[in-house]
Amino acid sequence: MHRISSEHEHKILNENSRIAEHLRAHFADHNILCLNIISAPGAGKTTLLERTLESLPPETRVAIITGDIQTDNDAVRLARYGFPVKHITTGGACHLEAPMIERALADWDLDDIDVLLIENVGNLVCPASYDLGEAAKIVVLSCAEGDDKPLKYPAIFFKAELLVLTKTDLLPYVCFDIEAAEQNAHRQRKGLEVVRVSALSREGIAPWLEWLGRKRDAVRPAAGAVA
Ligand SMILES: Nc1nc2c(ncn2[C@@H]2O[C@H](COP(=O)(O)OP(=O)(O)OP(=O)(O)O)[C@@H](O)[C@H]2O)c(=O)[nH]1
Ligand SMILES: [Mg+2]
């Protein structure tokens, strides 16, 4: 029984990888920076995106895809900023898959997009296994979750290019050693970049936007900075 289900899973992952590579090639053809944002539920992905979108000039060619098991709450929150937003309701799946992204993009003209931000379903485990064709994964960890999480959920910290430590305004009230959290993350991936952010005070938003701008410029050198 176990063997059949793992064979099935293997087949799904293979098909996912095939479509993800196809998406990656499309993004490269259109000079699109695609980022896959992953965290446990409630770590602050949508709030980080809200702070991001409110900081961008209206002419910025950014688009967002959000995934949730149920509700389009996040898409409603993000649509207020005037940039194109699509929502994927997975109806039970605990992660986004490449075919879902392919379908969501079907009626968007990729020539109109420079940066595609994907907010994955809140989950620190399964989304790490599903390539969406992104240039980089970003892992978001909030200071309310425990500084040992990079040790307990190593895969996403190993695969991510950036760790965003959110809710730093809560540090005086929670038992969270931020230096230990970073060290634990670096045990999974040496050189993992880190930004510390409070969406409440907006501290750390500027370095996050700088990181985003650098990434975007690497894909589209002539287009200027995002922020
Ligand atoms: N104090 C504080 N609260 C924050 C911060 N960022 C987010 N929150 C709060 O944390 C809660 C969850 O934030 P969301 O942005 O919805 O989290 P999420 O990761 O998008 O959640 P899911 O999409 O459900 O996985 C909300 O009540 C936010 O207001 C922060 O920097 N500081
Ligand atoms: Mg969200």
Image: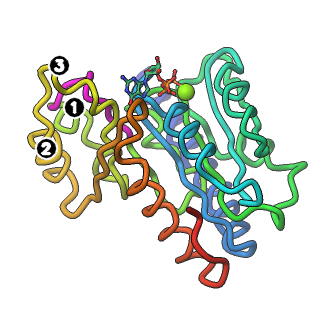
Point out residue 20 in the picture as x, y percentages from the top left corner.
63, 56
C-alpha gap between disc 2 and disc 3: 18 Å
Is residue 145 rendered magenta in the image?
yes
From this view, report whether residue 218 is shown above or below residue 196: below
Query: Of residues 65 and 46, which is closer to you in this image?
Result: 46
Horizontally, residue 206 falls left or right of residue 115, namely: left
Give amino acid for label 3: Val
**Picture residue at 26% right of the left edge, 34% below the top:** 153
Q: Which mark is residue 174?
A: 3
Question: Neighbour class for label 3 at 10 Å: few (<14), some, many (≥20)?
Answer: few
The earlier-in-sequence mark between 2 and 1 is: 1
Q: Is residue 131 magenta?
A: no
Residue located at (11% from left, 48% from top)? 183
| Labels 2 & 1 near each other (Cβ < 8 A) | yes
| Residue at the bottom extreme of this rendering | 222
Q: Identity of the amino acid at label 1? A: Lys
Q: Which one is nearer the viewer's eye here, 93 or 54?
A: 54
Segment tinted magenta in the rendering: 140-147
Residue count near mark 1 (Cα–Cα under 10 Å), binned few <14, some 14–19, many ≥20: some
Image spot of residue 207 (x, y percent): 38, 57
> From the viewer's perspective, is the residue at label 3 or at label 1 nearer?
3
Task: Identify the disc placed on residue 52.
Answer: none
- Where ligand 2 lies, by image quadrant? top right
Residue 177, given in percent of the width and then of the height, sits at 10, 33
Q: Is mark 2 within 8 Å of ligand 1?
A: no
According to the picture, the residue beneath numbered tag 1 turns out to be 149
- Residue 225, by quadrant, is bottom right
With respect to residue 129, does 93 lie above or below? above
Residue lying farthest to the front in this orientation:
201
The location of residue 133, given as percent across then percent down, is 60, 57
Q: Evaluate if marks 3 and 1 touch, with contact meaning CB atoms under 8 Å apart.
A: no
